Image: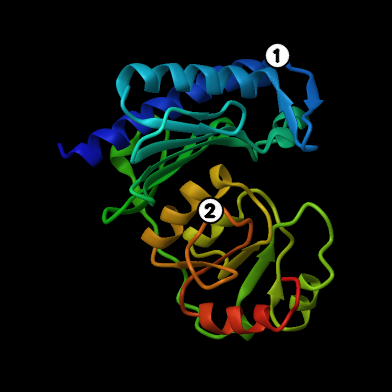
C-alpha cells in the first residue's frame, strides 16, 4: 500500500467516524445557532470536527488541519481539510442531502477527497491519479468508477448555479443553457454524468477541496474566475471539460459572475 493509499484509508475511517456521530444527533435532533458569519452550526458539527481532529493528531501528528468550525491547527506541507457536516440546514431539517467532507492537500495540491451521504449509506471519493468512485458504505470494494458526461455543446448542457441568494448576472445563464435548480448533490451529479456544469460563486476551501479532485478524477475540469485552480477565492466553475471553455467565455461576459 502506498502512502497516499494509506491516507485514503484513513480518510474513509474519518468519514466512518463522522457518520456515526452525526447520525446519532440526526436521529435525536439538535438545536441550531447562527455563527458570526451568518452560517448555521449545531453541536453535531462541533463534536464531529473535534473527534476527527483528535484522530488526526494521533494518526498524522506532523500534518496540519483546517476545519470549518475550529480553523487551522498546526502547519505543514500536508494539510487535512474538514467540513464536519456540509449541509447543516438540511441536517437540521431532517433531509438526506448532508454529509462530511474530508480532503488532503499536499504542497498546495488536493491529493484526495471523500464526500458522504450517511442517511443514504453512500460515499464518493477520489484519489489523485486513481480515479473517482462511488460505493455503498460497508462495500467500498464494490466501488463504481465515475465519469462525467460526454455532452460537448453548451446549448445542450445541464447547468446549475449554487448560490444561497439570487444572483442576477448568473440568472442570465437560463437564456443559454438547460438550467437545473441547485441542490447540495450538484457536484456529485456532475461527477456521475447527470450535469454538465456547476457554477459556485461562493463556498469555502472545505466546500471545494473534495469536489475539485472528485470532478477532475471523473474527467472534468475546474477553474476559478482568474483561470487558475484556486479553491480559496470563492468562485469556482466546474464542468465535464467538454463545455468548459464555452461556459467560461459566457461567464466572463457577465461582470459579476
- Judging depth in this view, the residue of 167 and 36 nearest the camera is 36
Classed neighbour count for the residue bearing mark 1: other residues with Cα under 10 Å, few (<14), some (14–19), many (≥20)? few
Number of marks in picture: 2
Residue 115 - label: none
Q: The C terminus appears in which quarter of the rendering?
A: bottom right
| Badge 2 element | helix
Q: What colouring method underlies this structural image?
A: rainbow
Q: Residue at x 45, y 59 (%)?
A: 215
Q: Residue at x 55, y 46 (%)?
A: 205
Residue that appears at 77% across and 82% down: 175
SS class, disc 1 = helix
Residue bearing mark 2? 188
Of the pair 238 and 57, the residue shown nearer to us:
57
C-beta proximity under 8 Å, tags 1 and 2: no
In the shown orientation, is residue 221 left or right of residue 85?
Answer: left
Who's the residue at 70% across and 31% down the image? Answer: 91
- Picture layout, residue 138 above or below residue 154: above
Q: Residues within 10 Å of mark 2 (few under 14, many from 20)?
A: many
| Residue 112 vertical placement versus 85 (above, below) | below
The image quadrant that residue 86 belongs to is top right
Residue 79 coordinates in the image, percent (x, y): 40, 37
Instruction: Looking at this view, name the residue that lies furthest to the left.
Output: 1
Residue 26 is left or right of residue 217, and the answer is right
User: What quarter of the picture does the N terminus occupy?
Assistant: top left
* x and y percentages locating residue 129 in the rendered image: 27, 56
Q: Position of residue 197 (x, y in %)?
A: 58, 68
The percent coordinates of residue 5 (x first, y second) are 24, 39
Residue farthest front in this picture:
75
How far apart in space, not on screen, are marks 1 and 2 (Cα)?
A: 28 Å
N-term mark: 1 or 2? 1
Q: Which residue is mark 1?
A: 28
Amino acid at each position: 500500500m502506498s502512502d497516499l493509499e494509506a491516507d485514503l484509508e484513513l480518510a474513509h475511517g474519518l468519514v466512518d467516524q463522522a457518520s456515526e456521530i452525526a447520525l446519532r444527533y440526526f436521529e435525536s435532533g439538535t438545536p441550531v445557532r447562527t455563527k458570526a458569519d451568518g452560517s448555521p452550526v449545531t453541536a453535531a458539527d462541533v463534536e464531529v470536527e473535534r473527534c476527527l481532529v483528535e484522530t488526526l493528531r494521533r494518526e498524522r501528528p506532523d500534518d496540519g488541519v483546517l476545519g470549518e468550525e475550529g480553523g487551522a491547527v498546526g502547519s505543514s506541507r500536508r494539510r487535512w481539510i474538514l467540513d464536519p457536516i456540509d449541509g447543516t440546514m438540511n441536517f437540521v431539517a431532517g433531509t438526506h442531502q448532508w454529509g462530511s467532507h474530508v480532503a488532503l492537500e499536499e504542497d498546495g495540491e488536493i491529493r484526495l477527497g471523500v464526500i458522504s451521504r450517511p442517511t443514504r449509506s453512500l460515499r464518493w471519493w477520489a484519489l489523485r491519479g486513481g480515479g473517482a468512485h462511488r460505493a455503498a458504505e460497508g462495500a467500498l470494494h464494490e466501488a463504481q468508477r465515475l465519469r462525467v458526461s460526454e455532452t460537448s455543446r453548451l446549448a445542450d448542457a445541464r447547468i446549475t448555479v449554487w448560490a444561497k441568494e439570487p444572483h442576477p448576472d448568473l440568472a442570465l445563464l437560463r437564456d443559454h443553457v438547460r438550467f437545473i435548480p441547485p441542490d447540495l448533490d450538484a457536484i456529485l451529479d456532475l461527477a456521475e454524468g447527470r450535469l454538465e456544469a456547476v457554477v459556485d460563486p461562493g463556498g469555502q476551501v472545505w466546500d471545494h477541496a473534495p469536489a475539485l479532485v472528485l470532478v477532475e478524477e471523473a474527467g472534468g475540469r475546474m477553474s476559478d474566475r482568474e483561470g487558475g485552480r484556486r479553491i480559496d477565492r470563492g468562485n469556482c466553475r466546474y464542468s465535464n471539460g467538454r463545455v468548459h471553455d464555452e461556459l467560461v467565455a459566457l461567464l466572463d461576459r457577465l461582470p459579476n459572475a
